[in-house]
Every structure is written in structure tokens, then in C-alpha cells.
Image: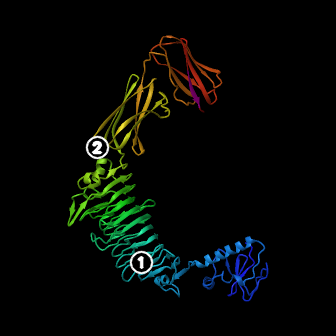
Amino acid sequence: MSITGIVDRSGYILRGESLIFHKGFSLKRNETPPLKSGFRRALFCGSHGTDEMRRRLASRSLFKYRQQTKIRSRRKSSSMKIILCIVSVILEFSTVMATQRNVPSGSYPTIQSAINAASSGDTIAIATGIYNESVSVNKSVTLLGTSSSVTITPTSGIGITVTANNVLLQSLSVTNSLSIGISASNVSNLSLINVSCNNNKTHGVSIGSGCSNVTVNGGTFNSNGTGRGDGTGAGINMYASGGTIISSISIIGPITASNNTTAGIWAYANDVNDTVKTITIGSTGSVTLTNNGGAGVILTGNVKNATITGNFTKSSANAAGVLIVGTYFSSPYAPINTLIKKCVFNPGYWSSQPAISLSDFGEAVGFETFTSPYNVSADSNTFVGATTLAEIDTLIYDYNDDSYDGLGLVILTHDNPLPVELTSFTASAQGKQIELHWATATEVNNYGFEVERKAMSNEQSTMSIWTRVAFVQGKGTTSAPQLYKYSDAVQSSGKFQYRLKQIDHDGNFEYGPTVEVSVTLTPDDYALSQNFPNPFNPTTKIQFALANTEFAEVKVFNSLGEEVKTLFSGVGEAGVVNEVQFDGKEFASGVYFYSLTANGRHEIKKMVLLK
């Protein structure tokens, strides 16, 4: 940028891309003042000046004093550059700059004193120590623990109360609060990173009415609450009331929420007009929920679009892994669209203390009447110790086992064990036909079976590649035993293996066991079989059949069409399988061809020698 200079009454001068300080200085045409002791560099366009300069320049209009400067330019473009730079200066000075305020220090003996003095965007850096205070965050600031040993232990009330948007809490611990560890309401863009809230009287973290875009990334939320069943003991709690909405809550591992009196994580919409929506638990990292009094995760009321992934270990109490509750007062309100995905449910859950528990229409406990949740599905979960779908069914509690026309019924889409329980698979040869039979005990989401085959060498048991030979439609979802069969035709003698590739409707698949069958054919026509093994090194076998007892030749050719070996030349017997062997130890690797010539017929096949 080419600028001679701008001087205002306070003595600030814009020189080149710099603002310098000098009293009583006058610029001539295109003159650039030297930098000497009397000058003070104050600002580069696009950077920041001192607090004093920011206040003084912000209170003046640079344009008002522009007439008092001595700026001359030979080109109109220079004027435009001056204007652009002045605008940049004004914009930069109009921005309040972030400041780091250290606690404790002479100016800020407490966390709250630093917050009170802070401006939006500031960082409160907190040194190692125990801080016996309740903290109110009413500005868009960052509270940053400078070590892993920064603990807030309030003498009364809530540990940290957040009432401002765009707040970051990082590397802090709140313990032994006589109320909630961290509480937020009616805020957006709140982030908690590696925060711990343990041993608090009620909840570890409470995300209240009107909150949106809240992220909890890492931390521990253990041993919160005073007593099981009092409704005030969750590691992380989301509670909407008064006709409000809580939305877009993300809980990212590694997180531990264990030994809480009510739940590790609890989302609760208090009334039909309240909503908690779009909750993601454990999409990345691990979320461990162990020994929580009511359940690892509880969803109550109008909780919409929740996805749950976690590692659940049952408590000694009558507790579930995931508890989904719809309630009914003047009208029903219940969780909608819950996906329980890739969870691990460790041993200890059973029918009356299930891994997944759903309330149901007409069910009542005490003064509460429940209703059904809507659209609950379980996908790719592991129920440790369960080996059949029937056993998994005992780990899922559904009061009526239909949940009001099936709306709340847990639909298993790909949980362990395999979605199709295969009880038998056999193969038998009848001439050229190989009969395959298999049976299933139960099926879930079964699209069908691909039948695959591969041939084997009679002597070396060397296997070729698997080849798809058929598809057999499955029965979808059924608890009734099913029988299947397929008949495959082979063209030569030998040993063959078969397997089933079971495919779900969502594209997932599993391979079943392999069966083997031997075939001996009595040919009634001319035939030349594919050599086996193929590729081979150094020997392979070739079978051929003749319709009549007659003269025949089997020869081998290289890729140039040159004959390299005669394997058979003589009278072949009809109605039997004739077999010859080719030894390629004297030949180079590559593609070769072999042919059968008999009674004016000529047939050729390809083989590969691979050393």
C-alpha cells in the first residue's frame, strides 16, 4: 500500500501501513517521516493497538480531520487505497480484543472477580488449586484450567451457573456441591471439554430449558445424587419445562458416568408442551455407564431423535441399561425415534432387570400411568453372554410385548448373534445333481442366501475360487423354523465345496459353514473338463469323456499356438471319466491351452501355469 500519511489532532500519523505517534509533525507531498525516538509505532492495518489508542481513535472520526492533513496523490487509485486502509483501522479498533486474565493474581484473587472484570471473548486461566466459591458465568468467556487439578468446591448453591451464550469450560472439576455441579439454561453454543462433575448433591451437569447446541466432550460424571429414585441424581441431566425446547445435545467420549443414584445420562421433557430433541450419545469415543441406580440412560416424555451408543454394566439395584418411558397425564407424550446402536451390554441383565426396557400403554407404577414410546430400534449391539435371539429377547422388556400396535416394540436389525440362526446345512450327490438343504430356527431382516461353490483337486485338495451359483429368497423376520433347498448341476467328477452367504435387507452379510461333497459321473457324451487345480504348479489333471470307444487325442499348446505336449493319443473308453496329468516343471509360467480331438470334434480350454 502506498500512503504518505494522515495526521489527526491527537498527533497520530498513518505512515505507509503503520500508524505512528508524533506531536506537531507536518507531512509534505510524498514525504515519509523517519522513525526516531520521538515516534511510537502503534498499529499495522489488520493488527491491534494499545488500549489507550483504541479508546482515543474510537472516539474520533478520522474522516473529520482528514482536511487538516497534507496528503497529495498523483493517482486516483492512491486515494482509494487510503480510504480502504482507514476503514480497516476503524474496524479493527471497533473490535474489543480478547484478554487472558489469570486466577489467582493480585487483580483477580477469585474466579468470579476475573469474570466480573472480563469482556466477551476473554479467557480466565485458572491455576492449580481448590476454589471454594460459586461461579456465575454471565459473559461469553472461556474458563480454562491450566492443569488437571483445578477444583471448584462451592460452600453453598450451584458450582458453576452459565447464563451466557458462547461459553467454553475446559479442564475443570466441580465436586461436593450442595446442589448441581454445573447448571445452564436458555443458552446456546456451550462446550464442556474434559470437565468432571463428581459427588454433587443433585446432578453433575444440568442442561436446562431453552439450551441448544451443547457439547460435552470427555470427562467424568460420577456419584451424583443423594438417593436412588428421588429424581435428582444424574451424571448428565437434560430437563425441559415450562413449554420449552432443548435441542442439539452431543455427548462425546471418552466419558464415564457411573454410580449416580438415578442415571448416568437422563433426558426428561416435563410436559406435553416440552421437548428434548436431537441427542447424540457416544457417536465417537467411549461412553461408559456403570452401576447407575435407575438406568445407564433414561429418556422420559417428548424426547425426539436420540441415538445412544455406550458400554453398559448393571448396578446391584433393579436397574436397566436403557430405560425409555412414555407418560400419560391429560394426554400421552413419549420418546420418538430412538436408535440404540453399537452398545455393549455386559452380563447381569435379565428379564426383570433388562438391558433395554420400554414403558407401555396401560402400565402403571404408583401414581404414574405410562404410554408407549414410538419407533425404537436396536442395531449392531452386543449382549455379552447371549447366544440366541431368544436369549436376547429376555433382555428386552416390553410390558405388553406389542407396545401399542408395535409402535414401541424394539426392532432388532443386526444384533448378536447372527440375525439368522442356521441350524443345519447338508449336501448330497445324485448323479450330476448336488442337493443342498438347510434350516433356520429364527430370522431377522433376512433378505436371502447366495449359494457359492468351488471345485477341489482330488489329490491335493487345492481349492479354486468361490463362484456364486444361485440366490434363494429369505423369509424376512420370523421366529418360526424355515426349510430351504437348492439343486446344483455339475459337469464333471470331483470334490466340491458349498457355502451360504446370508444377506440382510440393509446389505450386511455373514458367511455360514462349508460342506463338501464328492461326485463321480458316468458320461454319455463328449466332454472336456476344466483342469484342476488351476492355476497350478507344476502339475494339474485333465478329465475328458467320450460318447463312443474310439481314437482321441489330448494335446497342450503354448500362447503362440505351438504344440508343446501330447497327453493322450490312443483309444479312449466310452462311458467313463478319462483322466490325464500335465507336468509343467520343464515349462515357463504363463497361459497354456489344451484340446480334445475325437471323431471330428475339437474342444479347447485354457489353463495357467504359475511358478
Side of 588 where 279 appears, left or right:
left
At 39% from the left and 22% from the top, the residue drawn is 431
Give the quadrant of residue 133.
bottom left
- Whether 288 is drawn above or below 166: the answer is above
Q: Secondary structure at mark 1?
A: strand
Magenta-span inclusion, residue 101: no
Q: Which mark is residue 414?
A: none
| Extreme-bottom residue of the structure | 24
Q: Could you tell me the amino acid type at mark 1?
A: Ile
Please, which colouring scheme is shown? rainbow
The magenta region covers 604-609
Location of mark 1 (residue): 160
Q: Position of residue 130 (x, y in %)?
A: 44, 81
Estimate how packed mark 2 is, as few (under 14), some (14 to 19) or many (20 or more) residues with alpha carbons within 10 Å. some
Quarter where residue 607 is shown:
top right
Tell me the distance, in whole angstroms, between the alpha carbons under discs 2 and 1: 53 Å
| Residue at the spot 32% in from the left edge and 63% down from the top edge | 302
Q: Which mark is residue 479?
A: 2
Where is residue 581 shown, x and y percent of the image?
54, 23
Q: Is residue 345 visible?
A: no
Q: Position of residue 29 (x, y in %)?
A: 79, 80
- Near-viewer residue (278 or 298): 278
Q: Is residue 593 above or below residue 341?
A: above
How many residues crowd around disc 1 within 10 Å: few (fewer than 14), some, or many (20 or more)? many
- For label 2, the SS is loop
Majority SS type along the magenta span: strand
